[in-house]
Amino acid sequence: MNAKAPSPEYSSRRSILDLTHGEARTFLLKPESYCSLDLPPYIVFGELINGVYKVLDGKRLADLGQSNPRDHDDVNYTILHNKDGKYAWRPFQLIHPALYVSLVHAITEEGNWKLIRDRFQQFATNDKIRCLSLPVVSSSDERDRAEQVSHWWHEVEQRSIEMSLDYEYLIETDITDCYGAIYTHSVAWALHTKGEAKKKENRTNQNLIGNVIDWHIQDMRHGQTNGIPQGSALMDFIAEMVLGLADLELSERLQGAGITDYQILRYRDDYRIFINSPQIGELIVKLITETTTGLGLKLSSTKTKTSNDVVRASIKSDKLAWMARKQSGKGLQKHLLIIHDHATNFPNSGSLVIALNDYHKRVSRITSLSESPQSLIAIAADIAYRNPRTYAICAAILSKLLSFAESNDERLAIAKRIRKKFSQIPNTGHMQIWLQRVTFPLDRRIDYDEAVCKLVAARADRLWNNDWILSQDLKVAVDATKIVAATIRDEIAPVIPLKEVELFLSKAGEGYYG
């Protein structure tokens, strides 16, 4: 909305707001939209979501329940993702499929969808504040997620560089724990205005889609009004509703202050502010702080920084550093040690994932090793241990390196040592899922604490709480065992292939990789 027509270069992607209500429903019900977390290929959600949709089609979720879901704990399932290899962690949630489908259906009803699109158009009336993070839909062979990353490169990084023609300074800041801090009532404020949403007669109005969204989220979270689940395109879109309201209110504050010489690019909770005066920049940051505070959000003071080199500041420092030192022509161990050093300087960075992806491509082509696989395995495991963002790609590298061990017994012994190493840090559910991917073809009896792993190993049959459901048909439809594709699981190769963990399916995103 409020954007120029796409050039041929960008014609393969559309914003979610470019979709009809029916197209939006189809997009949000895609397995990739339901769960954006990297998972092995035998963990699938298509059958689950489609089955729930068929049961709920034409019905009200409330008529299929025996109690209110918000009266129950653990309605959603949380996969814990360690953020720093220590004690920080992020909860990714698999939203209860019945609540997810019900909410998608409500949002994409024709009248509600029109209201949402119209409201986003109002958010974007100030072309000096541009939201660049709306979910995008691929029209090519690329996955939607791949298109989202490519979109970031084109629309954020490259546009930021272009801003150096007009602006001398760049200020970067972001919102602290954005998803965890979003006040659910603020969704109704965003879609219907604060004045309308706060009217006494509207607070319980079931015809207001903002209220419907608010209530669904509370149903997922034991009645909590602070925070929305992370890990789906749906919640990314709902977050943009609240952040869109922030854009609108910020625009009004800037207009009131008489500030006109600026450009702001926002990607989710990250702001890039382009100005020609540091003093004006500080005032804009103050106004953003006032705006977000009014919505229950706050800026991160530690991540707010100013640069007078717009070109250099437009590109992440880790990416620049890696571009300067790429040395894939060296020996395998030296190459991996260089990556390990980069990980130390730029932990959990995007460039680290890129470097490991290149290394994975390299080791995938070799058929023998002239050096000990155990030392390489130790280095790769340590990178994963300290950099949770790399779990999937490191698992792929480890699976290849393990194949060079002399026997299956040796592979198992090393794999168990890796598992023991990771048991020393908390909140590693996501890593356990990928360790299981490595070890399952070797010995499916190896046990993991993560519930998803137990499902894969057929040692459990439950993820989310279904005690509030009355309908037998719906209970069958939300059966968590459906997320495990047994045929794929049983035929999975010990060595993880490139296609299993690579983000892009073609070379369309080479520019992003640098």
Image: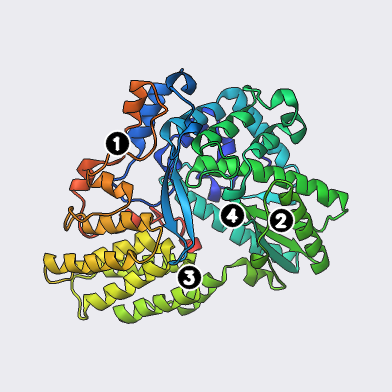
| Residue for badge 3 | 347
Question: Which of the 4 image quarters holds residue 428?
Answer: bottom left
Answer with left or right where residue 432 lies relative to residue 227. left
Can the viewer see residue 365? no
Of circles 4 and 2, which is in front? 4
Type of amino acid at the residue the image marks with label 2: Ile
Q: Residue at x 35, y 58 (%)?
A: 431
- Image-based side of 34 in relation to 169, left or right: left
Indicate how the structure is coloured in the image.
rainbow
Pointer 1 residue: 482
| Mark closer to the chain start, 4 or 2 | 4
CA distance for labels 3 and 1: 36 Å
Residue 386 can be seen in this image: yes
Give the label on residue 264, or none. Answer: 2
Badge 1 element: helix
Badge 4 marks a residue whose secondary structure is: loop
Q: CA distance from mark 1 to mark 2?
A: 44 Å
Q: CA distance from mark 4 to mark 3?
A: 19 Å
Q: Pointer 4: what residue?
A: 177
Per the image, label 2 sits on a secondary structure element best described as strand
Q: Quadrant of the N terminus?
A: top right
Residue 287 x %, y %? 78, 55
| Residue at 33%, 71% in the rendered image | 380
Q: Left or right of 360: which side holds 71?
A: right
Label 2 crowd bin: few (<14), some (14–19), many (20+), radius 10 Å: many
Residue type at numbered disc 1: Lys
60 in relation to 333, above or below:
above
Amino acid carrying label 3: it is Pro
